[in-house]
Image (cartoon, grey):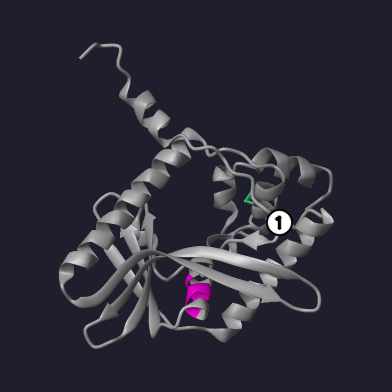
Amino acid sequence: MPEEINIGEIIDKFLDTESRAKVIGSYYPSEAGMCMRRVYYSYMIPKSEDRHSLRIFALGNNIHSFLADALKTAGDFSVVNEEVPVRINYSDEETTFSIYGRMDDFIVTQEGKKIIIEAKSVSDINRVESPDEKHLMQINLYLKAEAADYGMLVYIDKKNMDIRQFRVDFNEELYNKTVQRIKDLDLHLKTGKLPPAEYYFNDQKVWECKYCPYRNECMEAIAKGES
Ligand code: SF4
């Protein structure tokens, strides 16, 4: 093998994806609980994921595939479907939009229990004491869209595959809160009004600003008084 072959470059080329512009009116369960300003920017100023993020996503996807294979070969379920598409059409007197997602796994036990599984890879499982609200919002939307008995949020440590799992039952209050957030995002996008910098002013979430691709734009807006 010639010495000049650069495996890192080959991996990055393999992972490189064209960023597709998002369409206002089409929203995603995984983004419902994210910083609304960040999601707003992702529609208004689409950016490709950076190399570091693409590599981390690829690792996460591999873990999800591994879990799906394990479920399929377990023999405990009569149905195991992965990447199941979900669509919720929302309409009221003020607006109309659709929510599109994909459940990681939908399984049916031999006893007929239908369970939605959403897996999240994390860098340190010991920090996961309870489910993240944005993940609860995501799986709760799936539970609204698909007739299932309950959901399971499964956190998997990327280092050693240690696991923490949480049963999630459909929560109408959380569903209404989630839809209201999407309605708010929809209104901001349709009026071109920047949403609040939610994470920057939240002590528990401000650490995520460090990894936000729109940090510069957001900090400039805050400096101009758009907080
Ligand atoms: S820097 Fe923080 S507050 Fe600003 S858009 Fe990104 S996540 Fe939101």
Regarding residue 220, the answer to whether it shows in the image is yes
Give the farthest residue toward the bottom. Answer: 111
Q: Secondary structure at mark 1?
A: loop
| Residue at (20, 15) in percent of width and height | 1
In the rendered structure, which segment of residues is drawn in magenta? 139-143
| Residue at (23, 60) in percent of width and height | 69
Residue placed most toward the observer, 34 or 140? 140
Q: Is residue 202 magenta?
A: no
Query: What type of secondary structure mainly makes up the magenta span?
Result: helix
**Does residue 40 appear to the left or right of 137 in the view shown?**
right
Residue placed most toward the observer, 154 or 110? 110
Regarding residue 157, the answer to whether it shows in the image is no
| Residue at (72, 46) in percent of width and height | 44
Residue 173: give x, y in percent of width and height. Answer: 60, 84
Q: Is residue 142 magenta?
A: yes
Amino acid type at circle 1 is Ile
Above-or-below relation of 115 to 206 = below
Snapshot quadrant of residue 179:
bottom right
**Which residue is under mark 1?**
24
